[in-house]
Image (cartoon, helix red, strand yellow):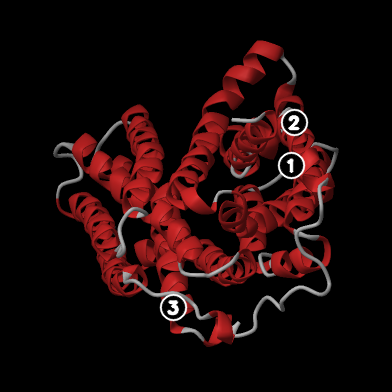
Amino acid sequence: MSFRSVLLVAGFVLVALNLRPAIASVSPLLDEIMTDVGLTPAGGGAITTVMIVCLGVFGPLAPLLVRRIGLDRTLLAGLLVLALGIVLRTLDGAPALYAGAAVAAVAIAVMNVIMPSLVKQHFPARVNLFTGLYSACAAAGAATASALMIPLERATGYGWRGVSAMIAVPALAAAALWLPQALAKPDGGPNGPRPFRGVLRSRVTWYVTGLMGLQSLTFYVILAWLPTIFLEAGLPADQAGYLLSLTTLVQVGATFAVPVLAGRRRSQAGYVAAAVLCTMAGYGGLLAAPVTAPWFWMIVLGVGQGAAFGLALLLITLRAPDPTAVTAVSAVAQSFGYVLAAVGPVLFGALRQASGGWTVPLTAGLGLLTAQLVVGWLAGRPATLGKANL
């Protein structure tokens, strides 16, 4: 492998590791942030909500930027803007906090959308391997950031602003590694294909979008409410936290392994069905017997949710014929996905409040997973967007 290839792979991996820490690092520090800035609990929760909404709303910027300046340069710009947003939200005052969170999320939204296109462009013969690699790195980046914030704060004595600003360092390192790719011959431009032509008219796009959206919704519901579900079932707080960590760690392995295996097959429908059924089993365990072998339910749930995430990203790449079309499909799928993800925890919380328990919300979750199974099966069947219609 040439030095340029090594640099490309290293840059790609480091970019993937930067896709989640800016979001995942908020929760461990939230109490301290709220106290320092003077936020209410609703105001503290709004930090993450703002970021998730931006992930959905600003994803469609990516195809326009790619058409204007090219794929690799768009990624470089995203990394630099991400670092800027991370630093901005550590400045004094709530306006800077929210503005920085929004700026960082806009950068992540653009990078989320173009990552499948980068796989299609730079690793066309190994789409399954590099989709699994980057989705696993994204999950690992989130887990690492959430785990290290408090230990870093204690070790350095910098406080939440200092350790939050440190997250900009990996983003700048990724930008440095990606710079040679961005300085190479542009990979797109004003005369390239128009990104959304034909994509919105294809049923394949909407099948993939349905899978991405519903798996995002069911994932963020669990992320937001899992500890509370276990606490109200009678488990102690520390065990509830460990169980959330367990299912998150299991997801890292599943997001890597399943796309690698599924990408070797002509049809991915069976893999999608298996992933959704595992997630349904996890939801069912929480509904019927949350304190009976909870570690088992969390392992099954982690396998299902991790596999579903990796498969959704893989199908975005496989179902489009070229990087331009991949960018457009990714923009549609991820924009709808994150909008649903932002709404899901709020709706489940409202159902919990109205019904007085978790039976109704978790039953609703099983209904959504049934819909995910249907659209996932349709998305997983062999099909490709026709070049002639793009």
| Placement of 143 over or under 49, stated as above or below | above
| Placement of 274 over or under 197, stated as above or below | above
Say what secondary structure mark 2 lies in. helix
Q: Residue extending furthest top?
A: 155
Q: Horizontally, is 310 left or right of 103 in the view?
A: left
Find residue 146 and report its horizontal and vertical position in percent: 54, 32
Name the amino acid type tagged 2.
Ala
Camera-nearest label, 1 or 2 = 2
State the quadrant of the N terminus: top right
State the quadrant of the C terminus: bottom right
In which image quadrant can residue 266 be found? bottom left
| Disc 3/disc 1 C-alpha distance (Å) | 47 Å
Q: Horizontally, is 381 left or right of 161 in the view?
A: left
Between 26 and 264, which is closer to the camera in this rendering? Answer: 264
| Circle 3/circle 1 CB separation < 8 Å | no
Q: Horizontally, is 148 left or right of 60 in the view?
A: left
| Disc 3/disc 2 C-alpha distance (Å) | 37 Å
Q: Residues within 10 Å of mark 1 (few under 14, many from 20)?
A: few
Q: Which residue is mark 3?
A: 204
Residue 173, labelled with which disc?
2
Between 219 and 175, which is closer to the camera in this rendering? Answer: 175
Q: Which residue is mark 1?
A: 38
Q: Residue at x 73, y 49 (%)?
A: 104
